């Protein structure tokens, strides 16, 4: 019995020593900044760290408890991991930004070389004598034809641009680098020229066919440039933004005799005729139209009808008086009833727009629409323009002509007009 009690007390003492050893090791491994824990059974008092009893010596017979490794704080490792994650994210973000910037730049450069998505806008440039590729690139840059002069120089070097021919050129902002280079290259062969006379009263489509017949440019290139290019002229900006206008520049290509190069750029051809119009239709003529309550577009529209109706200046002034009198009395004469407008609507417009453009056809046909048509029906000459702005003073509201003799008959009343129709062999 005594033996058992001794063993029990020895075992309890051994357990107590082990617990004291564990406590001592925990206290040694705790961070210095942590506050000591209060001893059990105390209120607000803490056991001093330096008052802990020294660990007892172990005898050979006593088993050695397993050593417990001190706990390592995970704060430093977590911080290292977090810094690593931030560096990775920053690297990825910078890489993506560089890739996006490079992609955007490459797309812009390619679009500039090929002139992708650029508007059709005519630009006139002057290339001086002795211009090299670098100077040409700067001229194009200032004119808004290219965005990257250094890229133009690289492409020109790669393509092998020839000798630059000095002179004045009309170019388009939708032309790519290659087209811009070819436009100013000096030809190895002398360029052939041809004289082309544009008759007064020709339509745009007739002028286009005439250019193709003389080898100046193709009719399709001519019409494409006419319809889709924005030209830098004040009078072009005054053209109404009306969806019923069939050809925007109809009436603005001045009929005259021109000398053109064969195989010429269509833009140069059109610009020559518009330059001539700008000189011939003077500010004085435009001011006179404005004083009479007419816009330049209305003046040209009326002049185009007069051009198609009358063969000479005398009859132009009389025909002008008839139409001006009708325009001044819309209550009694709401429609001009001009045969050339009906012909233009049925022969020129209807062929292109078909039944879907019936509204445009009716607007140009003055037997259907009221007042002036939306725009000119041809390109009138100076005599017709002056007749439109300076009509003869008459009381005529009707006229007709003998189709064989071209004799004109004018009348103030419908009854007189009916008699003239018989005289003109029209009844």
Image (cartoon, grey):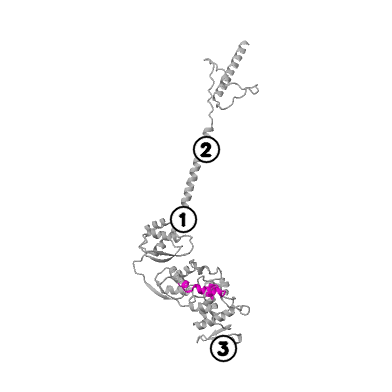
Residue 82, label in figure:
2
Between discs 3 and 2, the one toward the N terminus: 2
- Tell me if I can see residue 427 in this picture: no
Residue 209: image location, x then y, percent: 45, 74
Q: Which residue occupies 45% across, 53% down?
A: 106
Would you say 264 lies left or right of 283 here?
left
Image label count: 3
Residue at numbered disc 3: 422
- Tell me if I can see residue 400 in this picture: yes
Q: Quadrant of residue 216?
A: bottom left
Between discs 1 and 2, the one toward the N terminus: 2
Q: CA distance from mark 1 to mark 2?
A: 39 Å
Tag 3 and tag 2, C-beta contact below 8 Å: no
Q: CA distance from mark 1 to mark 3?
A: 71 Å
Between discs 1 and 3, the one toward the N terminus: 1
| Vertical arrangement, residue 293 with respect to residue 68, above or below | below
Residue 99: image location, x then y, percent: 47, 49
Residue at numbered disc 1: 108
Residue 396: image location, x then y, percent: 58, 83
Would you say 184 lies left or right of 247 here?
left
Residue 210 lies in the magenta-colored region: no
Residue 282 lies in the magenta-colored region: yes
Disc 1 crowd rating (10 Å Cα; few below 14, some 14-19, many 20+) is some
Residue 135, label in figure:
none
Q: CA distance from mark 3 to mark 2?
A: 105 Å
Residue 353: image location, x then y, percent: 54, 71
Find the magenta span and give its range: 276-301
């Amino acid at each position: 019995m005594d033996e058992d009690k001794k063993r029990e007390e020895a075992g309890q003492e051994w357990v107590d020593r082990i617990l004291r050893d564990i406590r001592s090791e925990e206290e040694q491994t705790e961070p210095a900044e942590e506050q000591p824990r209060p001893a059990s059974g105390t209120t607000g008092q803490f056991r001093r760290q330096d008052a802990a009893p020294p660990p007892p010596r172990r005898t050979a017979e006593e088993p050695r408890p397993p050593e417990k490794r001190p706990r390592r704080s995970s704060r430093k490792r977590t911080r290292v991991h977090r810094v690593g994650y931030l560096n990775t994210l920053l690297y990825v973000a910078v890489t993506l930004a560089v890739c996006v910037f490079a992609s955007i730049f490459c797309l812009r450069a390619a679009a500039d070389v090929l002139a992708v998505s650029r508007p059709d806008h005519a630009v006139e440039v002057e290339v001086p004598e002795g211009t090299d590729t670098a100077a040409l690139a700067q001229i194009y840059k200032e004119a808004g034809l290219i965005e990257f002069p250094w890229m133009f120089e690289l492409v020109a070097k790669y393509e092998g641009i020839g000798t630059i021919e000095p002179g004045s050129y009309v170019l388009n902002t939708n032309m790519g680098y290659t087209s811009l280079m070819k436009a100013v290259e000096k030809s190895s062969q002398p360029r052939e020229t041809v004289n082309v006379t544009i008759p007064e009263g020709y339509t745009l489509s007739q002028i286009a066919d005439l250019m193709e017949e003389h080898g100046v440019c193709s009719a399709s290139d001519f019409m494409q440039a006419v319809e889709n290019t924005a030209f830098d002229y004040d009078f072009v900006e005054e053209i109404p933004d009306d969806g019923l206008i069939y050809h925007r520049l109809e009436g603005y290509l001045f009929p005259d005799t021109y000398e053109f190069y064969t195989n010429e750029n269509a833009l140069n051809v059109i610009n020559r005729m518009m330059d001539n119009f700008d000189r011939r239709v003077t500010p004085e003529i435009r001011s006179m139209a404005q004083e009479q309550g007419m816009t330049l577009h209305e003046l040209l529209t009326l002049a185009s009808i007069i051009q198609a109706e009358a063969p000479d200046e005398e009859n132009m002034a009389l025909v002008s008086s008839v139409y001006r009198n009708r325009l001044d009395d819309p209550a009694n004469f709401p429609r001009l009833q001009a045969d050339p407008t009906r012909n233009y609507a049925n022969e020129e417009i209807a062929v292109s727009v078909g039944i879907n453009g019936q509204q445009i056809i009716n607007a140009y046909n003055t037997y259907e629409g009221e007042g002036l048509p939306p725009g000119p029906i041809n390109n009138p000459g100076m005599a017709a323009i002056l007749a439109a702005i300076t009509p003869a003073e008459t009381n005529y509201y009707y006229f007709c002509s003998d189709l064989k003799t071209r004799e004109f008959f004018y009348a103030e009343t419908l009854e007189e007009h009916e008699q003239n129709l018989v005289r003109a062999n029209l009844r």
